[in-house]
Amino acid sequence: MNCYILILEEKVKAFSLVGHGQKCSVSLMLKGYPDPLDTLVEGDKVVGYVAGTVKTFCYLFDVGFDQGKQQLYLEKIFETKMGARLTAVSSELQELINAREQTESVINITGEQYRQIMSLMMNMVSSWGNETIETHEECEIDEGKRINRGANILLYGVPGSGKSWTIEHEYCHKDSVVERLVFHPDYTNADFIGQILPVVDADKQVTYEFTPGPFTTILSDAYRHPMREYILIIEELNRGNAPAIFGEVFQLLDRMVEPKTVEGITYPIGTSEYGITHKYMAEKIYGDPAHKVRIPSNLSFVGTMNTSDQNVFTLDTAFQRRWGMRLIENNFDHVRLSLANAQILDTEVTWQSFCEKINAIIVSNKVKMASAEDKRLGVYFIHESDVTFDHRAAPSEEYPSLLAEYNDLVRNEATGGMSEDKQQRLAIIREALIHNRVFPEKVIKYLWDDAFKFNPEALFDTDHMESLEQVIRTFVYSKGRERFKIFKPTVQASLYPDTRA
């Protein structure tokens, strides 16, 4: 006997229409296998895995073989309505599935891994009333046993100030179930909450069903597991039209500040103060379309917002009032030393020194630019690897500068008369330049195009630098302290105090 995972398409509902103990035919056209009969045999064990937005194990099958039809069949022996999540299994099994689910339909697993998945599915069902898809009576959760950590938190600050780092280290706990998504201008309420979509059933008839979005899915999971903490992280919350994306569930963001009894049920602190009517969400979450939808107290929302992006979509006061706002300070107090002390290429200037000096100039530029503070460089704007100097870009002895050597090699390349040594040298220079350009293309470009867009003369030596192209070129092909001659003399003096008269 072998054990396998069968990858199912996200919208496939056919297996749910087949009763327990009944047979399901298997298509012979599976990814990665020209003929599944060569892979699966009678007696094998198969886990049905739904590789959708929320990855879950939903079905258990036994493999049989119909001699008359000469065809495999699966006999469904177990099903969970919501499914056990991929994130609940071992990291080894997660990596195996993530690596192969896009290219294969059948993944071989060990008997121990099969038993691990089966146990998770069984425990999930038994934890709230031994429910399978054939049981339509939902169990009411005891709200008195639900944890009450639920909150709405919005972290804001300049890009790279450490908002995501703060979420990871201060809001997400070891046993938290965390989902993450990003708002953007095209993200809609239907994407977030869910929508009616066409589904092809076992008889290849088209029906229409409510397909839940990430909000409904995590709310449903949190409702069913009252003793687990769930967190939905929404990155770049103001890059989408957040009030429109939340829509009517915006009302649910009002949380109870003390326990409250509604229709005989006492809800803990952190539950939605008011319930809303949404039959599709209610059917998905509670199995009752008339049930009022509320955010449970074990579900939190943590959003991030770059203050420099406030012109994308503004968040009105009514929306912000429902969130606990927290400014993430942009300083080096908690930044790892390897980043703070990283030298920028061969300039002898550390990232911390550069960042603090330039940010001071940005803040003092408020007369010329509204909200200058929001244009500061975030302390995590770059990574150590972005500033590491590739010494192979130093010019050879016979050339006065790297640019002179590079131009000479390129001209020889064009004529087709290069020696093998020079070809190798040109390849090395190009590779080194690609790395050494990361910092100027990321940081210097931001300063020219954004932070000092309206008055570059406040930072740059515009008497000699008339364009971004000239600025980047000068920085890349200079060496040491000369790289910062792109800035005006007073800025250079602040970066190198020992050069002051």
Image (cartoon, rainbow, N blue to C red):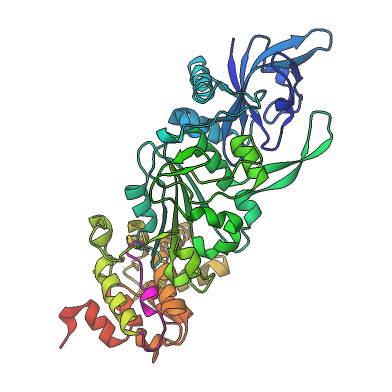
Q: Is residue 340 left or right of residue 225?
A: left
Residue 373 among magenta residues:
yes
Q: Is residue 98 above or below residue 452?
A: above
Task: Kindly identify the residue that appears in the image at 32 percent across and 86 percent down.
Answer: 488
- Residue 93 seen in render: yes
The percent position of residue 434, horizontal first and vertical second, equals 45, 62
Tell me which corner region of the image, top left, top right, bottom left or bottom right, holds residue 283.
top right
Q: Is residue 301 left or right of residue 215?
A: left
The percent position of residue 9, horizontal first and vertical second, equals 68, 35
- The quarter of the image holding the N terminus is top right
- Residue 418 seen in render: no
Q: Is residue 167 above or below residue 372?
A: above
Pick whichever, 283 or 480, lies toward us. Answer: 283
Q: Is residue 478 left or right of residue 135?
A: left
Q: Main secondary structure of the magenta part?
A: loop
Task: Kindly identify the residue that appears in the image at 34 percent across and 67 percent down.
Answer: 396
Task: Kindly identify the residue that appears in the image at 51 percent across and 74 percent down.
Answer: 311
The percent position of residue 321, horizontal first and vertical second, equals 44, 64
What range of the chain is rendered magenta? 366-381
Tell me which corner region of the image, top left, top right, bottom left or bottom right, holds residue 325.
bottom left
Pick whichever, 412 or 356, lies toward us. Answer: 356
The percent position of residue 392, horizontal first and vertical second, equals 35, 61
Task: Kindly identify the residue that appears in the image at 58 percent across and 16 percent down.
Answer: 3
